[in-house]
Each structure stands twice: as C-alpha cells, then as structure tokens.
Image (cartoon, rainbow, N blue to C red):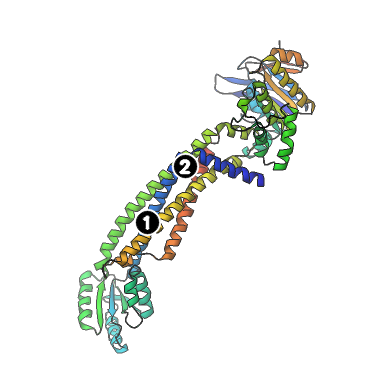
Amino acid sequence: MIRLENVTKSYSAEVVALHDASFEVAKGEFVFLVGPSGSGKSTMLRLLNREERPERGAVWVAGRNIVDMPPGRVPHLRRNIGNVFQDYKLLTEKTVFENVAFAQEVIGRPRHVIRQQVPAVLDLVGLAGKEDRFPNQLSGGEQQRVSVARAFVNRPLILLADEPTGNLDPATGEGIMRLLDRINTTGTTVVMATHDQRIVNTMRKRVIQLDRGVIVRDQARGVYE
Amino acid sequence: MWSRLTYTLRETWASFQRNITLTVAAIITAAVSLLIFGLTLLIQEGFDNLLSRWEGGVEMIVFVQAQATEEQRSVIEEALAAQEGSIIASWSYCDVACSLEDAQRLFAGDPATLELLTETNIPTQYRVVPTEGTDVLTLRALREAYQDGLPNVLSVTLAEDQLDLISRLQGFVGLYTTGLWISLMFAATLLIWNTIRTAMFARRREIEVMKLVGATDWFIRVPFMLEGLVQGIIGGATACGALWFINNRWTAGVAEFPENSGFAALVVSDGYLNWVMLGIIAFGALVGMIGSGIAASRFLDV
C-alpha cells in the first residue's frame, strides 16, 4: 500500500528532515511513527499526502509513485487518504454534520449519498445525536471524533494521523485509539505519528522509530522504548 | 452535479456577505470606471458623427440647393471635372437619400430640424477630395470661385474650418477620459483582487481542509471567480444605469441648444447606446472574473 525508497527531504542545507528513509507498509497494517520532535514524523506524513516532495527517492502510494504525479492528479490521490490532526482542523462555523458532509460535498458526492453516509459514520464514532452541535459545544475528545469521522467518511484506503491524542487526556486518547483500531479492522491502512508512549506500548503494533530524519528501528508488535 | 452547483452558489453568496465593505468598494470603483469607459465611447461616437462627412480624404463639400435642375448640376460637375488631376483628385455626388442619411447623424440631437428636412428641400452635396499637392490657399480660392460662380450653390465648406478644432477636441477629450477609465479600471481590478484575497485568507482553514480531502483547485477557485464575476456584472449594470441617465439628459439638453450650434451631431443613437451598455457589462464581468481568477490561483496555497 505504501513504499518509501531511499527518500531524502530537507528544508535547508542545515535542516534535513528525512535521510535515505525506506520502508514498506502492507494493506491493512497499523503503523506507529515514533521519535522526538523534529525527528521527521510529520514530514513523513506530509510526503505520503503529497503536501511535500522529496529531493531524492520514490514514494509509492496505492501502486503509484506520487513524487512526479501531475498536480491535477493530487486531489484524486487524496480522496484515498484520510487525515486526522492533533488540532482537529474542524470548521467552527459548521455543525458536526456539516463538517463531516463537507468532505463528501467537495468531491461531488450526491446529496442522497451524503444524507445516508454521514449519520452512519457519526454513529460509528459515537456521535449519533450530536449532528447539530458546533465544534465549540463539544469536548476535545468529541471534536477529535468528528475529525476521525471526516477522515473516514469517504472510506479511504489509508488514514494518516498526526498526534491525534496529543491534546487529549489519557482516557479520551484511549477512546480515539480504539476508534482508529476499529477503522483499521475494516481494511484501512493506518499510519500514526505519536509521542504517546503509553498508547504505543498498549497497542503493540508495528513501530517505526525516527531519529533526526533517520529510521533507527522498524519493529513488528513493537513498544515505544 | 446539482450538489456542486448548489455548493458553489451557496459559497459565493456567503463570501459576498462576509466581505460586504470591500465588495461594495470594489463594485463602486468598477462602476465609476466603467461609466467613464462608456462615456468615452459615447463622446468618441459623437465626434465621429461630426467628422463622418470628412471621411476618405474629403476636404471640401459643395452644398447644392434642392431646387437645382439637372442642367445646373451638370454645370457644377463640369466645373469639378475641369479641375480633376490638377487640384481635385476625385469627387462624388451625395444625392438626396445620401444627404438625408448624413442629416440623421448630424442632427441626431435636434429632432425638430431633422423633421423639417425632407426629400424635397434637403441640399445635396458634392464631396471633393483634393490632390496631394493642393494647399489650403488654393482650396480657399476654389471655394470662393464655386460659391460665387456656380449656379444654385448653397454653400461651400472646407474641412479645415471644422476638422482642426474637432480633431483637437476629440484628441484632448479622448486622451484624458481614456487615461481616467484605464486608471480606475486598474484600481477596480486591484480592489476585486484584494477582496478575493481577503475572502481566501478568511477561509484559509476551510481551503486547507478542502485540499486535504481531495477537492480540485478548480472546485475551490470557482466560487471566488463567480464572486468576482458578480461584482463586475453589478458594477457594469450600475454604470449602465448611470450612462443611460446621463445620455438621456444630454440628448434632451442638446435639443434645446440653438440651431447650427454644431452640438446636434454629438448625440448617439439608441442602438449604439445599447451596444455600449452590453459591452460595459461584458467588460465588467470579464475583468471581475479574470481579476478574481488570478487572485484565487495566486493565493490558493494558503
């Protein structure tokens, strides 16, 4: 599903975000990217989403090398990728329903499909009955659930999560992780960047550890260390 | 398709309301510049009406009274033919129908005079193109000779009597009005550009999310372009209203000017005005759409 081949990405001569990184993620896998701040986790996610392009190497997503993908094809790539962020990135003037529906609306899904799929995904993330609330009327955990619902509503092949529990208390964070695990069991590949030692150690999924842009460990059913 | 259309219209309307102050400023500036653009076209048309009889190198017109007989006209034509090659390069006869058509342009703003002119009383014209080497003094001498020596000649007019002043006036007015509308149109484009930029900045988070969930650049851009287009159309329509009012007042005013004041030709026909108004709306729409389209592309990476 994902393959990085000798990828190097730098923001300046001094700041090398990734250096000669290579790994492969199979369909349906759940992978943690761990490492200290500035180790290259977020850059890795941005490369997979084609928000950044590497100086060297190839990035394969769903069978296509996306490094030289024409800009016009990038939106189609992103329709196969869901994104969850630490700060949720919800639209504050839209309701819960509208925030999730927005992801379908902008790619031209018909109204009847939106009316059918959005309540189903809100039910999945445990927000049934809160469709008409605005983000500022929800707790942090609930806001992150909306964010997950928005990322999953188009049934993406891959879900990228950048510190999704970073702003949440441990109990709420666990709830989000259960949700991501559940989404993973539907066949969606999940790549999650995190600092949360407890979650990594509890979930025991594959761990790729980065240090100053270099992959220093790739371990199945790994722990944080 | 329907879902996209409603989304686009909804977003355009929302953005319109969100930036109401800037939107109004952009519309007013566009309207003023388009109005001046329209006025420039009307003024130029008025001058063209005045100058139309002098087209094709014509520098002298011999007006013949309506009651002139065929024989008398033959005498005039023989006199013209006698000068062909030396002073006169060519000449043509503008008959009753041609003269009536000419009067329609010249007296467009003076319907009372126009009404008095009929097939039986309108003077016909001989339009004379002099040879390259003919100077003004020779033409003036020829005018005197024709006026005094030829039968039933009403008057002889030389282009230099009218042409120089009108041309200078036309150039002067044309230059300044053109400069003014181009400057204002540029300001209007910048204002539309800035409105769109502000709208995009206000919605940067939304645009970021749209891009991340796979919206195409065109899908994001179209509501902003539509907003610019609507601003241009509203500005154009406002300018049309003002232009129609000004033209109406001018036409009514010219009718009250003294006869032979020369202003009667400075009135345009309704058909021309309609074309100008249509052009103004189209031009406003084009400028609005292009300005906003460029801004939307330029600031898409918010």
Q: In terms of depth relative to the viewer, which is nearer, A50 or B299?
A: B299
Q: How many callouts does the rendering have?
A: 2
Above or below A124: residue A196 = above
- CA distance separating discs 2 and 1: 24 Å
- Same chain letter for marks 2 and 1: yes
Q: In terms of depth relative to the viewer, which is nearer, B257 or A17?
A: B257
Above or below A62: residue A212 = above
Helix, strand or loop at label 1? It is helix
Q: Position of residue A71 (x, y in %)?
A: 62, 37
**Which chain's residue wears label 2?**
B
Q: Nearer the viewer, mark 2 or mark 1?
A: 2
Taking the image as drawn, is residue A157 in sight? Answer: no
Taking the image as drawn, is residue B171 in sight? Answer: yes
Q: Position of residue A154 (x, y in %)?
A: 72, 34
Above or below B219: residue A180 = above
The kind of residue on which mark 1 rests is Leu
Residue, far bottom: B71
Q: Which mark is residue A171?
A: none
The kind of residue on which mark 2 rests is Thr
Helix, strand or loop at label 2? It is helix
Q: Which residue position is annotated with label 1?
A: B39
The image quarter containing residue B171 is bottom left
Question: Quick one: quadrant of the C terminus of chain A?
Answer: top right
Q: Which mark is residue B23?
A: 2
The image quarter containing residue B92 is bottom left
Question: Quick one: quadrant of the N terminus of chain A?
Answer: top right
